[in-house]
Image (spheres, rainbow, N blue to C red):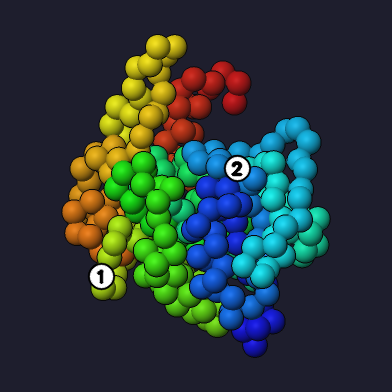
Amino acid sequence: MILMNTILIVNDDGINSIGLLALSQALRELGEIVIVAPEYERSGIGKALSIGLIRTSSIEINGFKAYSINGTPADAYFIATNKILKRKPSIVVAGINLGPNIGLEDILNSGTIGVALEAAIHGVPAIAISYCIRDIRRKNHVSIDELRVAMDVSRRIVRYILENGMPNGVQVLSINIPEKLDNIKVKVTRIAHVSYCDIHCETNNGYRIVSWLIDNYKDAEPGTDVYAIKYENVISITPIRLNLDGDCRSVELLVKDLFSLST
């Protein structure tokens, strides 16, 4: 039964994000909702873990029990599963992130993707949902109404995974939804292997990222997540696997050449 499932919701925008509120509303009928999230924004933190003391605070969000932590999104997974639930959830849903998570750099940098990867490492189905505002300066002006398409897509996909499991060979689904989309058009995409443009601005004391624009992503090939969001204005669903293995045979040749005397 769907109602017996436990849905762990985490984000990297912080416990007070409108995206977190929207996601909890969207999924409330699909099972037991548990929310554990950083007390403030931890964007760009990847799946980093905190070395120092992690404090938790119990609050209520949208009628659900929620926990705010002074750690990272990946910390939230560990605290939720080992200390709060004391078990693995049925699924981890990360988001709704206010900003894109597209391209290889975002996959490696994003706290939203990071907690989904953490869940996948532990064998838990995971999806990451991102609402792709084209200028991050709009982040504090996004409303629940603007997130209705993202909420609908989230609900459909989570329901499917709870009923059918993850698609074969897939451990994480990264879902990116264009800004102010009128109708649902979806493409399955691959991760764009492109780098960021020059993202740092000079200030009086050094350099910093002062804003985040869709143009920060270099042009990518059709069929990729970057192309789908930047040029086609369609929902991008990107399957991810945790396979970082390189070609051992080529390195065996290197070892043979460099260390032949020791073998």
Which residue occupies the extreme bottom position in the image? 1
Name the residue rendered at 77%, 43% in the picture. 55
Q: Quadrant of residue 83?
A: bottom right
Relative placement, left or right, of 199 versus 51 is left
Residue 83 visible in the shown view? yes
Q: Earlier in the sequence, mark 2 or mark 1?
A: 2
Percent x, y for residue 41? 55, 42
Q: Quadrant of residue 47?
A: top right
What whole-number distance in Å separates the C-alpha atoms at marks 2 and 1?
Answer: 31 Å
Q: Quadrant of residue 87?
A: bottom right
Percent x, y for residue 104? 38, 44
Q: Is residue 41 above or below residue 93?
A: above
Q: Identify the secondary structure beneath mark 2.
A: loop
Q: The C terminus appears in which quarter of the rendering?
A: top right
Mark drawn on residue 182: 1
The foreground one among 100 and 236 is 100
Percent x, y for residue 25? 54, 71
Q: Identify the secondary structure beneath mark 1.
A: loop
Q: The N terminus appears in which quarter of the rendering?
A: bottom right
Three-letter amino acid code of the residue under disc 2: Tyr
Three-letter amino acid code of the residue under disc 1: Asp
Q: Badge 2, how many Cα within 10 Å: few under 14, some, many 20+?
A: some
The foreground one among 219 and 100 is 100
Which residue is label 2 attached to? Answer: 40
